[in-house]
């Protein structure tokens, strides 16, 4: 049984590792767009109409799609003042409970509402009215349910690790 759980955890962790590696590359076009804007604006006095939109879409996507990888690496905020002094079994019990009662319901809601918003955006072929460029928004809004799905998958992995620690008193 433990080997099957371990295999599922490894597979889910690989999804988070892969997505983290893939989406970290969003930083490259973001830096290029902002650098181009700085040079165009301050050296040539020719600001772009597209740079702001590209920057917030790339940074937002980078941030959202990297959340599952951050969860995998343990990089999300945690209050460790009490937690670090607890036994592995107690930490596992607390973590598993919090995943079950708060994380999964919250992520399910986030996924469902994000999916509804993305589908509506695709239906109306939504464009931004933040700038004169008016870029399309539906691919950007699709990031929300994808990020939620990746977080749910990594949440399953973290829940399994926590439940194992709660039951066995040792890490998976």
Image (cartoon, grey):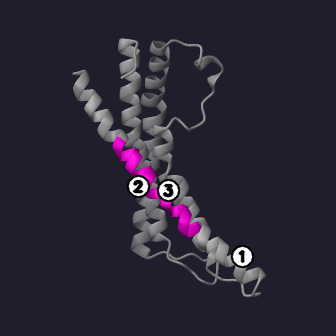
What residue do we see at 55% from left, 38% from top? 75
What residue do we see at 25% from left, 22% from top? 2
Q: CA distance from mark 3 to mark 2?
A: 15 Å
- Location of residue 152 with respect to 47 vertically, above or below: above
The quadrant in which the C terminus is found is: top left
The quadrant in which the N terminus is found is: top left
Callout 3: few (<14), some (14-19), or many (20+) C-alpha neighbours within 10 Å? some
Q: Which residue is mark 1?
A: 38
Q: Earlier in the sequence, mark 3 or mark 2?
A: 3
Magenta residues (range): 14-30
Q: Secondary structure at mark 3?
A: helix
Callout 2: few (<14), some (14-19), or many (20+) C-alpha neighbours within 10 Å? some
Q: Earlier in the sequence, mark 3 or mark 1?
A: 3
* Image location (x, y in percent) of residue 45: 77, 87
Q: Are marks 3 and 1 in contact (CB under 8 Å)?
A: no
Q: Secondary structure at mark 2?
A: helix
Q: Is residue 2 left or right of residue 67?
A: left
Query: Magenta segment: does it hold 16?
Result: yes
Q: Which residue is mark 2?
A: 146
- Location of residue 67 with respect to 115 vertically, above or below: above
Q: Indicate the quadrant where residue 38 lies.
A: bottom right
Q: Which residue is mark 3?
A: 24
Callout 1: few (<14), some (14-19), or many (20+) C-alpha neighbours within 10 Å? some
């Amino acid at each position: 049984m433990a080997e099957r759980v371990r295999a599922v955890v490894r597979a889910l962790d690989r999804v988070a590792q892969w997505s983290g590696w893939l989406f970290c590359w969003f930083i490259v076009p973001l830096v290029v767009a902002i650098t181009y804007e700085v040079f165009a604006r301050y050296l040539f006095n020719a600001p772009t109409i597209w740079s702001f939109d590209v920057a917030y879409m790339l940074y937002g996507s980078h941030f959202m799609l990297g959340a599952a990888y951050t969860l995998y690496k343990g990089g999300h905020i945690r209050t460790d003042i009490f937690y670090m002094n607890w036994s592995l079994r107690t930490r596992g019990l607390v973590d598993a409970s919090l995943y079950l009662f708060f994380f999964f319901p919250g992520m399910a809601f986030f996924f469902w509402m994000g999916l509804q918003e993305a589908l509506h955006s695709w239906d109306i072929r939504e464009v931004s009215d933040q700038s004169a460029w008016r870029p399309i928004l539906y691919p950007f809004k699709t990031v929300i349910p994808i990020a939620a799905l990746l977080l749910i998958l990594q949440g399953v992995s973290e829940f399994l690790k926590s439940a194992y620690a709660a039951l066995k008193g040792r890490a998976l």
